[in-house]
Amino acid sequence: MIDGQLIVAREKEHILQERTLERLYRDPLKESLELGLMFDRTLQVLIDVKSDATTSLDAIVQTLEDYQSITGNEKISFVISGNSPKPAIYINYPDFISFDYQSLEPINDVKVLDTIGLISLSFRSFTDWHTIVAWGKTAEIVEKFVIKGKELAVTGKLRTRNYTTDEGSNRYVTEVEAREILLLGTANGK
């Protein structure tokens, strides 16, 4: 954000005043919807905030909130990455805004989990195993083609559930409820 304008640039040396969020993204998106060019597509707009999170987010919300054709379209989502508020504050933003969660700290508040549209971390130094829950055709594909250790790309939602053990302890489990699973690797299963 520069002088109250949401400027789009990867690096500081690429900053141009005319490269605004409105001009490069909001207005073309609005026009595409008006022309019926996006009727069967899902779009996730990732906004990497480099300036102050609160000021930038307020400006992003203000820029988009009057465009119901965009913000009310369930096939379009806006994910805030980079500088973002603390997760407990995610729920204070409109439903059309979701966040890139960049931590391994567990979140037990379901309302906060529902605002997470993306998780991005550097996974170079560790491996985590995740429980994936799949239903219908997706489950059939998993059953037929997936073996333990198979590389997958999973799109879905994080869901947290709780249960009580036989000993009476409460346990929380976070799972990925798969919407789409893409098989990666080679044909021999690696």
Image: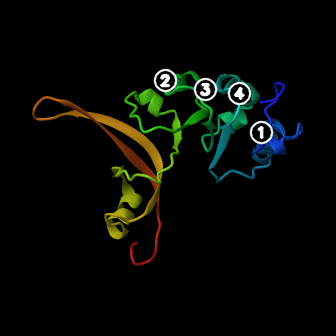
Residue 48 appears left or right of 23: left
User: How far is mark 2 from mark 1, CA to CA?
Assistant: 27 Å
Q: Which amino acid does label 3 sit on?
A: Pro
Label 4 crowd (10 A; few <14 / some 14-19 / many >=20): many
Picture colour scheme:
rainbow
Above or below, 152 relative to 91: below
User: How far is mark 2 from mark 4, CA to CA?
Assistant: 18 Å
Outermost left residue? 167
Which percent across, then down, holds residue 113? 45, 33
Which percent across, then down, holds residue 1? 77, 30
Outermost front residue? 125
Residue at image coords 52%, 24% = 91
Label 2 crowd (10 A; few <14 / some 14-19 / many >=20): few
Mark 2 / mark 3, whichever is N-terminal = 2
Q: Which amino acid does label 4 sit on?
A: Ser
Q: Name the residue under label 2.
A: 88
Residue 1 appears left or right of 17: left
Residue at image coords 60%, 30% = 84
User: How far is mark 2 from mark 3, CA to CA?
Assistant: 14 Å
User: How far is mark 4 from mark 3, CA to CA?
Assistant: 14 Å
Q: Which amino acid does label 1 sit on?
A: Arg
